Image (tube, rainbow, N blue to C red):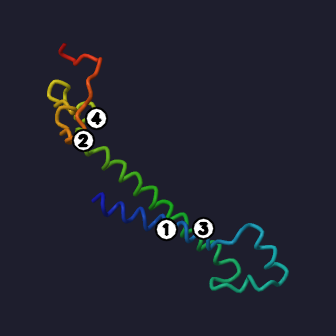
Amino acid sequence: MPTILLIVLVLSALGLVALVLLQQGKGADAGAAFGSGASGTVFGAQGAGSFMTRATAILATIFFLSSLGLAYFSGQQRTTIKSVTELAVPAEEAKPVAEDVPVMPGNEPAGSDVPKAGE
């Protein structure tokens, strides 16, 4: 069900973007009043405004409802996610790294003034 809602959400968002970009601005009506060719649209001089407005409202409602549905379903899935500190290896189980590294011949460590951890 959440997958279907996600598909509906994406399609309605794309439809909303397309409809908003297709609509004329507020100042476009002034050009049509003086005999401009912009009034010869598919829906007529006034029909496109009401159709586009109604389609935008319907798509916005679908987008809103599908968003609410996805929010509801995401709240229903309770998975216990461990934090990073719970997933870390405890210090007493961790292996010392420096003792695991092999020493290449000719690169033996020189004597050091610093005592080792156990001394």
Residue 36 position within the rendered picture, expressed as x and y whole percent measured from the top left: 80, 83
Name the residue carrying label 4: 84
Secondary structure under the numbered disc 2 in the rendered image: loop
**Label 2 to label 4, Cα distance in Å?**
18 Å
Mark 3: few/some/many CA within 10 Å (<14, 14-19, 20+): few
Horizontal placement of 33 versus 96: left or right? right
**Label 2 to label 1, Cα distance in Å?**
30 Å
Q: Residue furthest right?
A: 34
Q: Choose mark 2 or mark 3, whichever is in front.
A: 2
Name the residue carrying label 1: 14
Amino acid under disc 1: Leu
Q: Residue 78 bears which disc, if any?
A: 2
Secondary structure under the numbered disc 4 in the rendered image: helix
Q: Earlier in the sequence, mark 3 or mark 1?
A: 1
Q: Residue 39 bears which disc, if any?
A: none
- The residue lying at 54 percent from left, 63 percent from top is 57
In contact (CB < 8 Å): disc 3 and disc 1: no
Q: Using the image as rendered, state which of residue 116 and residue 19 is in the foreground.
A: 116
Amino acid under disc 3: Val
In contact (CB < 8 Å): disc 2 and disc 1: no
Q: Earlier in the sequence, mark 2 or mark 3?
A: 3
Mark 4: few/some/many CA within 10 Å (<14, 14-19, 20+): few
**Label 4 to label 1, Cα distance in Å?**
37 Å
- The residue lying at 30 percent from left, 61 percent from top is 3
Residue 104: quarter of image: top left
Horizontal placement of 105 versus 69: left or right? left
